[in-house]
Amino acid sequence: MFQATDQVLIERARKGSKRAWLALIKRYEAGVFNHALRMTRNQSDALDVMQETFLSVFRGLDSFRADSSFKTWLYRIVHHRCIDHLRKQPLVSESVDTDDLICSLDGPEGLLASVRQGGQLTRALNELPPAQREVVELKFYQQFTFDEIGLQCGVSSNTVKTRFYTALQKLGQRLVGDEYE
Amino acid sequence: MNKQHQQLIEAWLDNSLSGSERNRFDELLESDPDFQSMVTAASKLLVDAQSFETVPVPEWDRAGAFARTQQSYVQLPRWLTYGAIAVSLIAVSLSVVSITYVKSLNLNTVTAEVVEQGSIQAEDLAHTDAYMTLLSRLQQQQQQANAQLVDYVLTSSRQSREHDMKLLLEHLQKQRQADIEYLDSKIISAQYRNY
């Protein structure tokens, strides 16, 4: 079945086509929501981030230039909305047991946590600084290249790689440490 | 971290290790605990990402978001747009008629001014053309600036906007200081002249 390209949908949405706009949302909402969920670890916050993102996207459609892909531009906005959201949140104390955190999550967050090997990976990911965690999420779960992640986060691909390998080092140390405990 | 190690892990993630790279990769896995732990972490993440089930998106008001955003675009009724254009045209034609009338009065009294009037009209037309060109350039610049501003607001974080605003304020402060110093020097030199 023929599927309109992003550019065609964007053009139609710019001209006021509600159908094209809804098609564009349908195409990306699952990815945006799941990424926001992994970053915020909370369903209602992820929903807020997703709604704010699509609202910003629609308002900014006229300023979108096709010099980068729509998906890259979209995730650039998601990135900033997530960072803004995380800045508003109070820091979680290190003494909080992340097992309790995982068990207390209901619905999609619980599902998200349960599929990650016994929460071990979740715990290790949660201990990473947001910038490093985001790079790991975008690389492994959204399959973006380092260059694309750099465009989304507004940093060079070298910086992205530095964050990525630092994160891998920390995760590796943490996961190996857990095995010996 | 070792650059070569990064390249090996990158190639491994892309599934593009050559034969010699594969051998080096295996050697490092045996001998380097740091390399081993990073590969272990990456493997777990790969497995997790592959087995990860997408969490379904809860129902939300997609159409409502569209309506809210549409409200921000106030569309003028078509008759109002055409009406505004018509009124503008009438105003312009009235001005032209009045200018022509005034000029024709002058023409009746002084015949010798005919050539001069013609040149004035030509000059007026040239000025109008220049003005219209300038206006259209200004409109284009304004549209570009608006698009840039929207893009900036959408894609920049609050922290970077605060940082940019701080830089702007510092720049304005410096300009203001320079203006004060310039005015001070002017006042002092004027006072000397008065003496």
Image: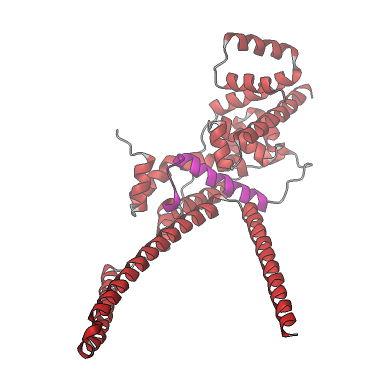
Location of residue B29 with respect to A79 vertically, above or below = above
Q: Is residue A158 magenta?
A: no
Q: Is residue B116 left or right of residue B194?
A: left
Q: Is residue A71 magenta?
A: yes
Location of residue B138 with respect to B93 vertically, above or below = above
Q: Is residue B175 left or right of residue A16?
A: right
Residue B37 appears in which quarter of the rendering? top right
Main secondary-structure element of the magenta-colored stretch: helix
Q: Is residue B149 left or right of residue A10?
A: right
| Residue in view at x 62 percent, y 38 percent | A134
Q: Is residue A107 visible?
A: no
Where is the N terminus of chain A found, in terms of image quarters? top left
Tell me how many marks there are: 0
| Residue in view at x 33 percent, y 52 percent | A17
Q: Nearer the viewer, residue B145 or B187?
A: B187
Instruction: Please state the horizontal and vertical placement of residue A95, each as a whole percent of the image.
Output: 79, 42
Q: Is residue A56 visible?
A: yes
Per the rendered image, the range of residues in magenta is A62-89
Residue B50 appears in which quarter of the rendering? top right
Location of residue A155 with respect to B64 vertically, above or below = above
Q: Nearer the viewer, residue B153 or B176?
A: B176
Instruction: Please state the horizontal and vertical placement of residue B20, each as a whole percent of the image.
Output: 61, 9
Instruction: Please state the horizontal and vertical placement of residue B99, each as a whole percent of the image.
Output: 27, 82
Residue extending furthest bottom? B109
| Residue in view at x 33 percent, y 36 percent | A3
